[in-house]
Image: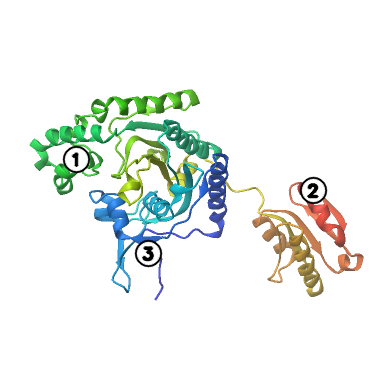
Amino acid sequence: MLIQIPRGTYDVLPEDSEVWQKIEETARKVCALFNYKEIRTPIFESTDLFQRGVGDTTDIVQKEMYNFKDRGERSLTLRPEGTASVVRSFVEHKLFGLPNQPAKLYYIGPMFRYERPQSGRTRQFTQFGVEVLGSKDPSVDAEIIALAMTFYKTLGLKKLKLVLNSLGDPESRAAHHEALIAHFKPSIGEFCEDCRNRLEKNPLRILDCKKDHDHPLMKTAPSIIDFLTEPARDYFEKVKGILDEMGIAYELDPTLVRGLDYYNHTTFEIMGSSKGAITTLTGGGRYNGLVSELGGPETPGVGFALSIERLLLALEVENISLKSETSLDCFIAAIGEEAGRKAAVILNELRQAGLRADKDYMDRKVKAQFKQADRDRSGFVIVIGDEELQAQAAKVRNMADGSQEEVAFTELADYLKAKIN
């Protein structure tokens, strides 16, 4: 019986892996520019981490997590997002005690959510995210937004829109909480079961409901902006002011609440095009209470996460290709058994010299070997046959213009490096 890939997952085949590598390389380069260091956390964690960190009233915790028990009957979960794991590591390894503060971290890796698979949304997906732990400076909020925008623009995306909101401080949230209950309670019977269950415990989650997002009461719900305390309003104004001075345009959206419970103060999304529609490419914001919730000291935090899968769709919509024009520097076309042995030796020498090189291993005819070189997007083809063995020199074909030169075997590496550079 043919065993197939699980629903909601995918294979990245060799023809596409170059694009993924380019994206990951760009992420790392941009993070280096902003002085962010990579952190790698386990793919599975204690289930309690996400129940406490993400919020037990969220769709992620209630419906989407992959939970299992190990042989010790411990409840474990495949990580559905990256922030909780990073904060857990920050607390466990006491990174708050290091002299260089704040901790500026980034991660790239797979996440898992049991969702209905659709374009740009899979059950295993890859996130690139950043977290800054230890600073309540509003310029950090602006910095991570600038980092995300720099990443997208470096890859060539132009159709981007930054959407901004504030969820305020605990006092703001408490007042807004009561106003939302008063707003929805008289008609809560018209809403889904999830919304009814969340009314008293966390009414903010109602605004994030996918089933009832078109209900008339959603449009008239009290805005958190109207309940911001003076300090919260001042903080938000500072973030907006820094973005203005950076020249980063944004739109205000008082309904933007994000899907995770740990957010407060600044929250944002970066929108882009996906198959002709506008979709969220990035989401993030502040989470000043999360570190203490997970057992650490009171420590402010802010971060974002973006989906590589949705990024790929946005690149496709804008007709941006990340594939390089050449895959190989050179390909050796050998004619005959003795030439094939010599080609193996020369191939090793070229690779040791830092050249991307390959040869035929299927005993193909010369014409077929040139076709393979063309499929491999090779810049040059080195031809070796009986005549070349006798002269100890190969014919080197430039695949870009069709020109050809004779080059001594001993000089091939230097010749190609000079041509390529």
Q: In this view, does 135 lie to the left or right of 169?
A: right
Q: What element carries label 2?
A: helix
In the rendered structure, which amino acid carries the disc numbered 1? Answer: Pro
Tell me which corner region of the image, top left, top right, bottom left or bottom right, holds residue 392. Answer: bottom right
Q: Which mark is residue 203?
A: 1
Residue 187, x across and y down, in percent: 9, 37
Distance from disc 1 to disc 3, alpha carbons, whole Å, reads: 35 Å
User: Who comes first in sequence, dot 1 or dot 3?
Assistant: 3
Q: Residue at x 86, y 69 (%)?
A: 386
Tell me which corner region of the image, top left, top right, bottom left or bottom right, holds residue 160. Answer: top left
Residue 272, x across and y down, in percent: 42, 37
Tell me which corner region of the image, top left, top right, bottom left or bottom right, holds residue 286. Answer: top left
Q: Residue at x 76, y 63 (%)?
A: 333
In the rendered structure, which amino acid carries the disc numbered 3? Answer: Pro
Q: Name the residue under label 2.
A: 419
Tally of marks: 3
Q: Camera-side residue: 70 or 329?
A: 70
* Comparing labels 1 and 2, the label whose residue is closer to the camera: 1
Q: Mark 3 points at which residue?
A: 6
Q: Is residue 313 left or right of residue 291?
A: right
User: Who comes first in sequence, dot 2 or dot 3?
Assistant: 3
Q: Which residue extends farthest right? A: 391
Against 137, residue 358 (above or below) is below
Q: Which residue is drawn at 24% across and 54% down?
A: 62
